[in-house]
Image (tube, coloured by chain):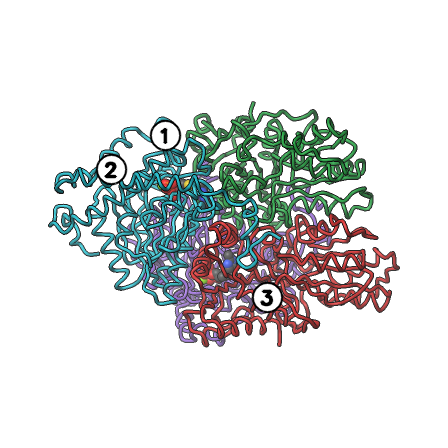
Chain colours: A green, B red, C purple, D cyan
Amino acid sequence: MKFCELVRKAIEDEMDKDETVICYGLGVTDPKGVFGTTKDLHKKFGNKRVFDMPTSENGMTGIGVGAAIMGLKVIMTHQRVDFFLLAMDQVVNSAAKMHYMYGNQLNCPIVIRLIIGRGWGQGPTHSQSLQAWFAHIPGLKVVMPTFAEDAYTLLREAIQDPNPVIYLEHRWLHETNESSVKGNISIGKARICREGKHCTIVSNSYLTLESIKAASYLSERHGIECEIIDLATVKPIDEKTILESVKKTRRICVLDTGFEICGLASEIISMVCINNEIELIDKPIKGSMKDIPEPTSYGLTKNTYLDAADISRKLLKMFKETIVENELMKLKPTRHDIPGDSFKGPF
Amino acid sequence: MKFCELVRKAIEDEMDKDETVICYGLGVTDPKGVFGTTKDLHKKFGNKRVFDMPTSENGMTGIGVGAAIMGLKVIMTHQRVDFFLLAMDQVVNSAAKMHYMYGNQLNCPIVIRLIIGRGWGQGPTHSQSLQAWFAHIPGLKVVMPTFAEDAYTLLREAIQDPNPVIYLEHRWLHETNESSVKGNISIGKARICREGKHCTIVSNSYLTLESIKAASYLSERHGIECEIIDLATVKPIDEKTILESVKKTRRICVLDTGFEICGLASEIISMVCINNEIELIDKPIKGSMKDIPEPTSYGLTKNTYLDAADISRKLLKMFKETIVENELMKLKPTRHDIPGDSFKGPF
Amino acid sequence: MDEQIGTKWMKMKKESEKEKKVIYKTMKRIRMIEEAIAEKYPEGKMRCPTHLSIGQELTPTIISMLTSKRDKAVSTHRCHAHYLAKGGSLKRMIAELHGKTNGCCKGKGGSMHLIDMKVGFMGSSAIVGNSIPVGTGIALAEKIRKTNNISIVYLGDAATEEGVFYESINFAALKKLDILYVCENNLYSVYTPLKERQPPNRNIVETVKSMGVEYTKNLTERKTEDLYKELKLVLGKIKKNGGPGFVEVETYRWREHCGPNYDNHIGYRNESEFMEYQKTDPLNMLEQMLTKEVVEFEIWKEELEKRISDEISRAFEYAEQSPWPEETEGIKGIYADNGSYK
Amino acid sequence: MDEQIGTKWMKMKKESEKEKKVIYKTMKRIRMIEEAIAEKYPEGKMRCPTHLSIGQELTPTIISMLTSKRDKAVSTHRCHAHYLAKGGSLKRMIAELHGKTNGCCKGKGGSMHLIDMKVGFMGSSAIVGNSIPVGTGIALAEKIRKTNNISIVYLGDAATEEGVFYESINFAALKKLDILYVCENNLYSVYTPLKERQPPNRNIVETVKSMGVEYTKNLTERKTEDLYKELKLVLGKIKKNGGPGFVEVETYRWREHCGPNYDNHIGYRNESEFMEYQKTDPLNMLEQMLTKEVVEFEIWKEELEKRISDEISRAFEYAEQSPWPEETEGIKGIYADNGSYK
Ligand SMILES: Cc1ncc(C[n+]2csc(CCOP(=O)(O)OP(=O)(O)O)c2C)c(N)n1
Ligand SMILES: Cc1ncc(C[n+]2csc(CCOP(=O)(O)OP(=O)(O)O)c2C)c(N)n1
Ligand SMILES: [Mg+2]
Ligand SMILES: [Mg+2]
């Protein structure tokens, strides 16, 4: 099953099991059902539990919080992270703090699904990937699945989590059906999705798929064995898994879909570098989105995103290996603004 | 002159010089004039240029943006950073991106003054220090003055800056009148406010005053000479000044008034650690706000904030010096929730 | 709306005496508690921003009389009267103001974050407008659960300037939620009068009505009888027919916005305006009326005052003797599952 | 408001022929441009989310006729008609859709971010509601500068669900800004009909009026004559007396929300509703009328279509031949002073 289908199935299964679960958001009940992730759920569960909503992001977040503290389990969806900027007051000043601020008397089980846009000229206001913002705020959990099966498992867990959980879906993952590597996953636990002894790559979301491609290439052509840690949960970060891996590899490359300044990659690098038990062989590598608003033009986005070729290049430099450009070119997609046939715009 | 008076003077001087400058915000024209920082300005400049506003943070930010792209220079004030969470859409999706997104045809000269609350039980929603959020967003500048004279210089420059500038004032600095050390300051330039060869302390806002106390103690009693860099501008970060200092001292302690995860301190540590020209002698030290919502109770805030004693302790550990607790205790304020007589609540 | 309600309840038959006394008792109690806080605040033991409700006791008093503990309420920075009228624990409130471990939020919330879920008081927020959608979501949950409980949302006049107010009203009307929005218009937001924030021809009641809210009304605390009748009517209709209601109630804050003092001297409002409102203070007016109407009211009143006064003393004692929270408590309870920090 | 305006303008004296032809010309041009975009979009050269204005040309056409280039306008994701009616450069718009360096945003903005400051088109935003306060701030600046220019804010029906709409209206009324808010109600937000977002008894015009906006009106594009008269009246009053205005105009989008296709088959709206609106399409109706009224209209029309068609071809040629932006352009222009990235 595809990522989007498994997101839908996670919601369906939880709604089946637990009648306190409700689900709403713009487009949730429309014929497209948020890229298929909520399609026809209202037909099964009725419009009391599954509904579309007014375009009122802040209000609807507060309403979700109110319903959640009354014991409903709330799933709210936004088609882009960017739209959710309107709701920061409710997510930061209400959802994140309530359990603490009211002396643990109530809790706020709300899952906020946010979709990260990419490609086909999404441009500056349809492509932001703000996990660092959410991770910065005490009281939130932040989940960012990569593999379709993990999306399922983590969403089910997020719905049952007694805390507010920000659940970030990458638009380019919706049509994928990568199954996860073996082993269980749960919130707070990163996934080692490739073992290796030379360098640890910490990555998340769509970038993990690029990392895997890069790692195969590096292994086959250069004998460099990367260990890939797919974060899966951005907060709380699975410090233990990361540190253990780095203790072994003594090299680290951190990749993140968000902006570079005060971003997640810097956090992880800092975490590794202040740790007393780790002595790195090489300087850490950081790969994030440049500190620029994303342009729209096909002509300008060519080098906006890191792909397997860029990642390989970074690692080859670290290992002082010769870079064979035309091999790297083969790691690039035909069209840089679409992942393949699965998504061709416009939205 | 005090910090708050110099903030006021900066606004007054710019309004005198440049009639396109306008200034508004909740309480701007009231008898208290935002802790004295805008007192009576409306009497001099009239209510077209200086006015109070409805409690509509997001709308009023967009309105400021609209006025700014028309060529007015806008100063907007909020009494707490926390209230401004309502306006993230306008600051991120409009102000920060407009110049870029519209192909450089217009620009958005708006200064957003935000006050960081502290002490007297300000609690979870009146004490947040979110500079990392703003620094994360391409297109914003972020200024955070420590010294009264710098507050003046940087605010004047911010008002004339053609870009949106977030200007963060710490509530505990308003009544201070520390004059800055010699040398010019400007946006993008950090201030070395103490020279030293053993360790670089990068700090900001009120924490710099604590760092200075700690550094004196460390120098006098332990012969440890800290170089203190007061960031002054949080974005763009003055990488050069920091790196040059660390090249010399080969040790770094980064202090920040914000939360620890994906915060400014992690960013600076990561920046230093990925730099090829720097080899540290000791692991970097990080000092930020713990990943918890701030509690209200006097009994719970005792160890919430770093003070000169905490900073000294961290550095003594780094240098493996003996820690004399009763000496450190003398570096602590009498009441941990007030800076002294200058601020005694309630707001 | 029913146009019959002008009838002078206050001058009506004996049965109403009981209600009047209940109102008086609740108001008086809140007033005395708030005055005690004001008196003791300068001692510096209640170390948090504190917004007193003195002058604004009547509306929450009546609303809580007309609703039950199963009905829910949320409130603002100025939440003491709402909390107390709803039946929130006095001891735990005073302990909270002292930052003590027996406080209603274990000291983590302070004066602006009161909560007592046992009586349906679901919390207050220090961010203007912030609790409006939360109260609306509470009503949504009640509706989904088919409980027939009403959600009360208290808000100030400035909160109607926040966009989230309209977003919430729209949703409540769309989903026909059983909710009453109570806008206590005390003419000021901090030191800023209405005219600097809203146009003079503004009519919030009309606005809310045009947005699809059926029961709306403009009220004032200067007319206790009408206020009681109207609130009874509105709440009755919500209970019976369902759907949202909105009332705007004119009221007046006596002391400074935040803190224990009077502040007429600083110049943002007229002494004469203040005097006018003091003259028509609902508590005093009610007291005068009861003095005339009720036999041996003075004796009853003295006893009442004594009782309240004792209760207040006990609450402060309780708060002062209540232990400080353990220091480690501060790093606990960030998450609901595994409470502690790292 | 003036109640005289019902007079049948369309049936009036010859002088109006000129206006009608101007309206027709502008609408027709926008329609043809949008249809050309729809036709070419599947070629995959315009690689950005694109929201067509087909069916919604009339209101911006009239408004731009009645205002000047000195007056300002801001718009939404569905901005093509607003931009073109205001006089925005066609070539630079098509180049922008192609992501080329001669695009009106140098390719950085795309279809949802059009701007042409020379004609007072101050930009559009892809975030629902986002440009409403920005347009309000523009009006504030004009007021402070005493220019007497009007600010036009275009918004969709869903944008009235965003709190910032009310915040902006309140401020415009408070400061008596010279601004016209134009809500184009096309009954849908993406695939969601009004009834799932707003209560049935909702009346946005009343709401805005109650908030202190003097000139408000409910209008429809189905009555071209009334629409013209009313907009003229409202804009005239704003120019003359100052202060804000608000109109809600019923309109209808023909194609899918985002993209070039028809989408009635997917089931969110009725084919019959669609047919009804097509029957009363203002452009067709105007064309029928002009056919009857104007001598040799067919010839004039053919020439017009030819001219527009040529213009469109030239614009697409211009766009396709326009160079891609240099790759380094992407990292330039983050700040207004020293444009480049690091
Ligand atoms: C979002 C936000 N903006 C500003 C403030 C600062 N503030 C605290 S109370 C207050 C006044 C609110 O006035 P009103 O709603 O009328 O309530 P009142 O104090 O009169 O009871 C303001 C502006 C805040 N707490 N939150
Ligand atoms: C804040 C925000 N929420 C949601 C969206 C997604 N979105 C894009 S267009 C649109 C529909 C808006 O409807 P309306 O305002 O009626 O304009 P129309 O498309 O009908 O012209 C929505 C919901 C967005 N862009 N911004
Ligand atoms: Mg008030
Ligand atoms: Mg619409």
Pointers 2 and 3 in contact (C-beta within 8 Å):
no
> What's the residue type where badge 3 is placed?
Pro
Q: How many marks?
A: 3
Residue A128 coordinates in the image, percent (x, y): 55, 43
> Given the image, on which type of amino acid does mark 1 rest?
Asp
- What's the mark number on residue D263? 1
The span from disc 1 to disc 3 (Cα, nearest Å) is 59 Å
Numbered label attached to residue B74:
none
At which x and y percent is residue C215? 34, 48
Horizontal side, residue C90 vs residue B317: left or right: left
Q: Position of residue D165 (x, y in %)?
A: 40, 51
Subunit under mark 2 = D
Identify residue for label 2: D281
Q: CA distance from mark 2 to mark 3?
A: 63 Å
Instruction: For mark 3, name the chain.
Output: B
How crowded pointer 1 is (Cα within 10 Å; few <14, some 14-19, many 20+) is rated as some
Name the residue that disc number 3 marks. B346
CB within 8 Å, label 1 to label 2: no
